[in-house]
Amino acid sequence: MTHESAAPVEGLRERHRRRTAADLEEAALGLFCERGFDAVTIEDIAAAADVSRRTFFRYFASKEDVILSDHPRRLDELQAALDRRPADEPALTALRHAIMSMADTYEEEREHMLRRFSLMTATPALEARSLCLQRNWETSVTEMLAARMGVDPSRDLRPGVVAATTMAAMRVATANWLAGGGRVELPVIVATALDLLDGGLQAAASPPAPRRRSAPARPAPAARVRAL
Amino acid sequence: MTHESAAPVEGLRERHRRRTAADLEEAALGLFCERGFDAVTIEDIAAAADVSRRTFFRYFASKEDVILSDHPRRLDELQAALDRRPADEPALTALRHAIMSMADTYEEEREHMLRRFSLMTATPALEARSLCLQRNWETSVTEMLAARMGVDPSRDLRPGVVAATTMAAMRVATANWLAGGGRVELPVIVATALDLLDGGLQAAASPPAPRRRSAPARPAPAARVRAL
DNA sequence: GTGCCGGTTTGCACTCAGTGCCACTTTGGC
DNA sequence: GCCAAAGTGGCACTGAGTGCAAACCGGCAC
């Protein structure tokens, strides 16, 4: 094919813009990991990307946003994944598939994601902003679920609860992924967490031991992060 | 009784300190509600409480903290409520009771809480900080649940998932409470949300209509916020 | 009452995030 | 080549948050 569909020419201007954004992002991530988020000023980042302080703010609204700039894009992907599911599929199943495809994406970018997550858990400001963005996802997901279920999300608690708890499970799973250094595949952890949720909390929390698939007393060392 | 137990004399100094903190909090809440969080400077708050800007920071670490200063105390109360439950009670039941007693507390402070929540939802900075503090609760609750269940929370996903999803349900419930202007009692909404969660999401999300207690086509107008 | 100790307040100066404004340069279309 | 639009850089400004040192005051011993 001789031409792209949505990018007629992709002029020098646009290319330069992307380049600068990528430079800033890379410079910031490097400096943050090296010295810690709070010990890096925007001046430092701008200098490392050969750009002025003022220009930094033309690309990112805040220091936090350099790390979290992909959130809107990821929400779009999540929505797209949800929209791709057949309309007659149960809402929860569709959501589960969408979440799992997001987990797959994270696993593919493994190293990058692990670096970012570890930065976030170490930096209250980043964590706060990230949680806020995740809550925005929740709102969108709630509306999509409500549409699928044919109910009004402001009257019916169900879409909101399903969205919020599912994403909470995803959050716990990624935290566990990070804590284990990414040695267990994220999709496996996420699937486990979602299973716990779907089975009802009662079943998950009450007995001293769940069903550890008729496990021996000492679980296999390679799978020590998994619960089921 | 002639004397208090933990406050031997409660000197003038201590009283003055409490007074100043309360003044700052009240002044801040008033100004925020009047003009919006972002349009109020710390200078303004300090002036309204007859105190210097510098002194404000001796009482609160940030502008957000004036509104969220009670979070640590509430976590203590939650922990205390959880500790009061019998040790042999299932972890989920104990957590549910603790959460419900927190919901009761919120309902008692109704007006104050509704003002605060509406401020938070209107102010990204406040929402972000609040979510971050709630995530801290999650960590504590996770550890308490893990202790009750006799498992290691870093190896077993269950305590984390139970804690995170339960608190997510609480969050959705309070948002719904606020959206309804507090006309439905918070404990009722929270109980509904927790029921949804305990019953398993599958049961909650799949059928076009749940069990609307063999409801008529048009639900009763007085209870329109409730789902079950 | 006097005087001292230690906690409290305050003003000052400083760093840094974030924003508005304007002049200057570069790019892409003609 | 020329022009409009987009991008960049410098400057100045507000406001959050912190360190420091001087002034202040409640509690206590004498």
Image: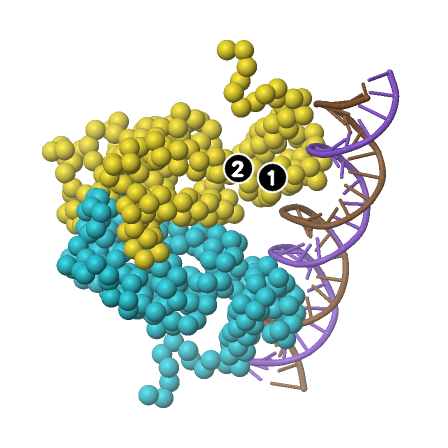
Chain colours: A cyan, B yellow, C purple, D brown
Query: Percent from the top left, x then y, of residue A12?
Result: 53, 81
Q: Mark 1 and mark 2 in contact (Cβ < 8 Å)? A: yes
Disc ID at residue B69: 2
Q: Look at 65% across and 72% down and name the residue there.
A: A47
For mark 1, name the chain: B
Query: Image quadrant of residue A191?
Result: bottom left
* Horizontal arrangement in the rendering, residue B211 relative to residue A33 (left or right): left
Up-down relation of residue B100 to residue B61 (above or below) = above
Up-down relation of residue D26 to residue A163 (above or below) = above
Can residue B161 be seen here?
A: no
Instruction: Name which residue type carries label 2.
Output: Ser
Q: Look at 27% across and 48% down and name the residue there.
A: A162
Q: CA distance from mark 2 to mark 1?
A: 8 Å
The answer to whether tags 2 and 1 share a subunit is yes
Query: Percent from the top left, x then y, of residue B207?
Result: 14, 47
Query: Percent from the top left, x then y, of residue A217?
Result: 21, 59
* Horizontal arrangement in the rendering, residue B111 relative to residue B214 (left or right): right
The residue tagged 1 is: B60
